[in-house]
Image (cartoon, rainbow, N blue to C red):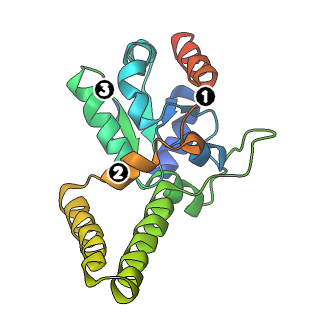
Amino acid sequence: MTTPTTLATDEARTRLHELTVIDVRTPGEYAGGHLPGALNVPLGHIQRALPDIRHAADRGDVLIVCASGARSENAGRILAENGVSAATLAGGTGAWAADGHELHRPEGAPRATWGMERQVRLTAGAIVLLGLLLGLVVHPAFQLLSAGIAGGLVFSALTDTCGMAAMLARLPHNRPRATDLDETLAALRNR
């Protein structure tokens, strides 16, 4: 691959017609707005899509995109470990939109799902508040629930992983329907 590891939004926009863009966010996040022509292969399905992504990479450059860049970097590492070169979009779709570039939304798509970071913040905050409330009303030991979430958030920041996001990604609104993923893999094979 001749492109650098990370593309700035303006460079990606000018090269969009020649790139195979793979969005590794959840289907709900993807439906909320994605780069024009992007194909949705959630991060948890990258291994399954590997042969088809390799096929697309053999025919041209691949750009991996997520909300902010963290998941696309993880996907890029997985691809690199399997001999597939891919660039990532600096700042993800957030930077793309902030720079004034258009996001596409599927026709008739259901209401967009919150981004994964927002889902994690809501869940973590709710559990912390619940632990504190139960600790005051029922028994002080429930405050350990809040401490556990705090420890998990620190661990998440230090390791750049998120167990809570991995669990939330398994919820039905965050999973791709099998037919959608099959269509995406077929599109990759036809590139």
Residue under circle 1?
177
Residue 96 appears left or right of 120: right
Asked whether the beta carbons under mark 3 and mark 1 sit within 8 Å of each other, the answer is: no
Q: What element carries label 1?
A: loop
Nearest to N terminus: mark 2 or mark 1: 2
Q: Report crowding for label 3: few under 14, some 14 to 19, many 20 or more residues within 10 A (C-alpha).
A: many
Q: Measure how far apart labels 2 and 1 are at the Cα level.
A: 24 Å
Nearest to N terminus: mark 3 or mark 1: 3
Q: Measure how far apart labels 2 and 3 are at the Cα level.
A: 17 Å
Q: Residue at point 51% right, 50% down?
A: 10
Q: Is mark 3 on a helix, strand or loop?
A: loop
From what the image shows, is residue 64 above or below residue 150? above
Q: What residue type is labelled 3?
A: Ser
From what the image shows, is residue 96 above or below residue 118? above
Image location (x, y in percent) of residue 175: 54, 37
* Count of numbered marks: 3
Give residue 70's mark: 2
